[in-house]
Amino acid sequence: EMHYLYYGYAYMPEYKPLDNNPYLTRVMEIMAKIAIEEPAVGDLDELVMTAMQSYERDPFSPQILNILAYAYGALGDKVREKAFYERLNGVLAVIAASGDGLKEKSPMHIIMFSHGTDFIAAKNIGYRKGQIMSRTVEFVPFDVPQNKVKGYYFDYSRIYWNKPDNYTFK
């Protein structure tokens, strides 16, 4: 089911992968100032409100799903914490099942550029800047190889399916 939700989102009119998400920047600013171990309720409320605005722009962002699970957990809302945590794990499982990511011919498929690096970060692996391998595949190298794996390949071709007519590639 999550497979259809994740990849089906690319066919929705709300899917705008090349648009900027200004709320994500604000979420990161709030996270930078929050006392992670003992956050203030006001900071958490602001975080949830802003993260939900970001979530509306990218409802499958592993980063935002993780932040929302954390924030609701810190607020004591175990039901929403579990819901966002399960959605996060569902998205990560869908990405992992889309390919092994070990070769350019078997990349993992993502619908937003950030989902690839979010996937790696969710595994607690440091990474460096991605390298474009072809028109549709990017390689993201790890800081330190993991079990002889130097990084993952991600297919981002879905991002260009709904390219705005006036968009110019860099």
Image (tube, rainbow, N blue to C red):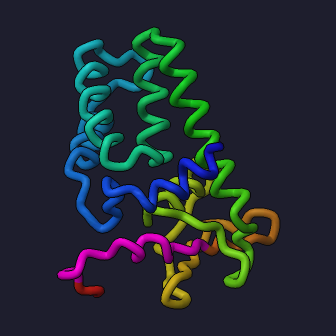
- The picture quadrant where one finds residue 67 is top left
Relative to residue 103, is residue 70 drawn left or right? left
Q: Residue at x 22, y 42 (%)?
A: 26
In this rendering, is residue 85 above or below 12?
above
The reply, left or right, for residue 70 in relation to residue 14 is: right
The extreme right residue here reads 147
Disc count in the image? 0
The residues colored magenta run 154-167
Left or right side of 64 for 16 = left
Q: Position of residue 75 (x, y in %)?
A: 40, 12
Q: Quadrant where the N terminus lies?
A: top right
Image x and y of residue 35, in percent:
34, 24
- Identified at 39% across, 16% down, the residue is 38
Query: Residue, x 39% and y 56% (percent of image)?
Result: 12
Q: Is residue 120 magenta?
A: no
**Can you give x and y, in whole percent of width and height, for residue 146 in the image?**
74, 63
Q: Nearer the viewer, residue 138 or 19?
A: 19
Choose top left, top right, bottom left or bottom right for residue 138.
Answer: bottom right
Closer-to-camera residue (57/113): 57
Q: Quadrant of residue 86?
A: top right
Specify the farthest residue to the bottom: 134
**Depicted 31 relative to depicted 83: above or below:** below
The C terminus - image quarter: bottom left
Q: x, y percentage for residue 43?
A: 25, 21
Closer to the camera, 91 or 9? 9
Reply above or below: 108 against 22. Answer: below
